[in-house]
Image: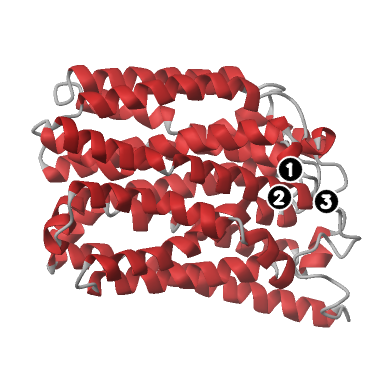
Amino acid sequence: MNGMALTNDDRTHVKHAPGNGRGFRAAAGLTPRWLWVVAAGLFLTALNLRPAISGLGPLLEEVRHGLGMSGTVAGLLTSLPALCFAVFGVTAPRLARRYGPAAVVLAGMAAVALGTALRPLAGGTGVFLATSTLALAGIAVGNVLMPVLVKRYFPDRIGTMTGLYSMALAGGTAAAAALTVPLTQAIGGGWRTGLGVWSVPAVLAALLWVVVLLRERRGRRGTGETHGSVRPGGENGARREPAPRIMRSPTAWALAVFFGLQSTGAYVTLGWMPQIFRDAGVPATTAGVLVAVIMGMGVPLAFVLPRLAAGMRRQGGLLAVLGVSGLAAYAGLWLAPAAGAWLWALLLGVAMCAFPVVLTLIGMRARTGAGVAGLSAFAQSTGYLLSLPGPLIVGLLYDTTGGWDGPLLFMIVLMALQIGIGFLAGRDRCVEDES
């Protein structure tokens, strides 16, 4: 449809989402050549969805000392992403219907750029939390609308494009975790410089979406379409489909709970894993690289696993394999954190790839664009809300016990629950049928 042959996983998605590809190029006002620009926009946006978080982990100890944070407040800081994603992510579908998903993602990238640029200027915890919240609000709308943008611009290639942006998301996460400390040392200026540098790629992403929106507007003018004839957030100018009642769907709830459990693991990893390694005697730079290895595993696997998941009728077995890898990693960190650090990082990196798989399931478990938007907002916002206590509990357990045995046991229990919920989330059902 866009000049590229359909793969098996893409045909699977067309089967699950009939009729969503009708005239999408005309509705977007873009030629196939310009769809490559949209793909670049998706890639660059995904690249910016985690550096504001993963870049903080390796410098958390320095930030705590610089701003006078206690362990409990630091735990709250590591819970802040989940809180912002839950609160701001739920607003994304309504904003997208009014202004269009691309325009909202543009605003989100602008917020990320501004928040990450202002955060290093904070003189106290309050300002640091406020500027972090601004950046995280921009990330939140990007989280929810990425599957919507894929459904809108590439309805016949959902598996491939989800894999592409998931790979970019993992790459951005790993790059920030690995490079923040070396950049801080090379540039100078302490932790403030190391955090502020990540505003630059967000500016580039925002500029690319400006180009896409200007081209869409020019395309609509060229075809004589008015603003009212093609809704900015609509599907191809066709009749808007009513959104299903997501909260009545057991599959939506399974996806939300699974999303919450895997998010808990991800944010505990981003927020506390560098400290776990450092407390085990691993140097700070190496601890950052180990976290980069964890997230970097998602670069190749995030491109492969969504395509693999899309070719399956049920994905519970695949999610179980990823969960068992996580169980082995946490057990290893409990028993020999320094001696097997690289192995535990690799295993935990495999477990973290549950994230691109669940993103793929969001695209597969709804037939319409409205259904995907509603399911994405519900699963992500509810999931992030459920994940809120996790990093805070880890911080409290660490402060209370003075070690990592309690937090790691807590993570083992959550991973076992994630495996069980994965079988429910992986069933071959659509939310429209259940709601």
Label 3 neighbourhood size at 10 Å, few (<14), some (14-19), many (20+)?
some
The image quarter in which residue 119 lies: bottom left
Q: Residue at x 24, y 65 (%)?
A: 125
Q: Nearer the viewer, mark 1 or mark 3?
A: 1
Q: Nearer the viewer, residue 215 or 387?
A: 387
Q: Is residue 366 left or right of residue 87?
A: right
Check disc 1 and report the residue beneath it: 246
Q: Nearer the viewer, mark 1 or mark 2?
A: 1
Q: Residue at x 60, y 75 (%)?
A: 211
Spatial CA span between label 1 and label 2: 7 Å
- Residue type beneath disc 2: Gly
Q: Which label sits on residue 21?
A: 3
Q: Are marks 1 and 3 in contact (CB under 8 Å)?
A: no
Spatial CA span between label 2 and label 3: 19 Å
- Count of numbered marks: 3
In the rendered view of the protein, which quadrant contains the C terminus? top right
Residue at the extreme front of the image, as rendered: 400
The image quarter in which residue 16 lies: top right
Residue 71 position, x and y percent, is 19, 47
Residue 58 position, x and y percent, is 21, 49
Above or below 169: residue 11: above
Element on which disc 1 rests: helix
Residue 281 position, x and y percent, is 8, 33
Element on which disc 3 rests: loop
